[in-house]
Amino acid sequence: MKKVVVQLEFEGGQIKKKAMGKVSKIKGVKSIAIGRDKKMTVIGDMDPVFVDKKLKTICSSKLVHLGPAEADDEVTTNNGGQGENGVQQAPAPAPAAVTTVIPPPQPHNPYFNYYQNLYYPPSAPPWPFY
């Protein structure tokens, strides 16, 4: 679960409605909230860049915060740190942060001819010489 906070710049409630509608249609969104300071908080399993891209079609937006969703929203029961049999359990270790490195895009070669090597093998001439 990811938590994305986006700063929106809009005037009027109609744009706010459109922004809520656009983001709610994204697959994986669990909850959406817009505060009085015009910050939209989106929680769910979705691409944060895609959320920002959808919002930029309606109004200007800026990605403010990106991180994991807090666990305080989940309801948990705690027996004072004791297990089923009343035995004291050690606290669970915190999960390690996951970082993903995205390679930079490769430059496009406009002079590359895809069909150049399809029809003729590299050792043969482009046409038969008689």
Image (spheres, rainbow, N blue to C red):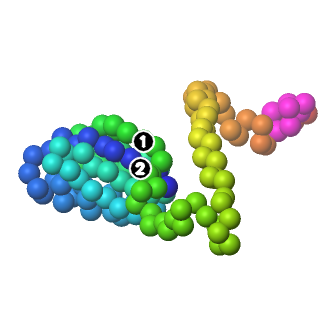
Q: Is residue 84 above or below residue 60?
A: below
The single residue placed furthest to the bottom in the displayed view is 84
Where in the figure is residue 30, as x and y percent of width and height?
40, 63
Is residue 100 a member of the stretch shown in magenta? Answer: no
Magenta segment boundaries in residue numbering = 120-126
Residue under the image location 34 percent in, 45 percent down: 5
Label 1 sits on residue: 66
SS at circle 1? strand
As drawn, the label of residue 3 is 2
Q: Are marks 2 and 1 in contact (CB under 8 Å)?
A: yes
Q: Residue at 18% of width from left, 55% of height from top?
A: 16
Location of residue 41 in the rendering, given as x and y in whole percent from the top left corner: 32, 51
Amino acid at dot 2: Lys
Determine whether 130 is above or below 40 in the image: above
| First of labels 2, 1 by sequence position | 2
Asked where in the image residue 101 lies, by quadrant, the reply is top right
Residue in the image at 45% along x and 43% along y: 67
**Residue 81 image offset from top left, x and y in percent:** 58, 60
Q: Nearer the viewer, residue 23 or 6?
A: 6
- The answer to which of 24 and 74 lies nearer the viewer is 74
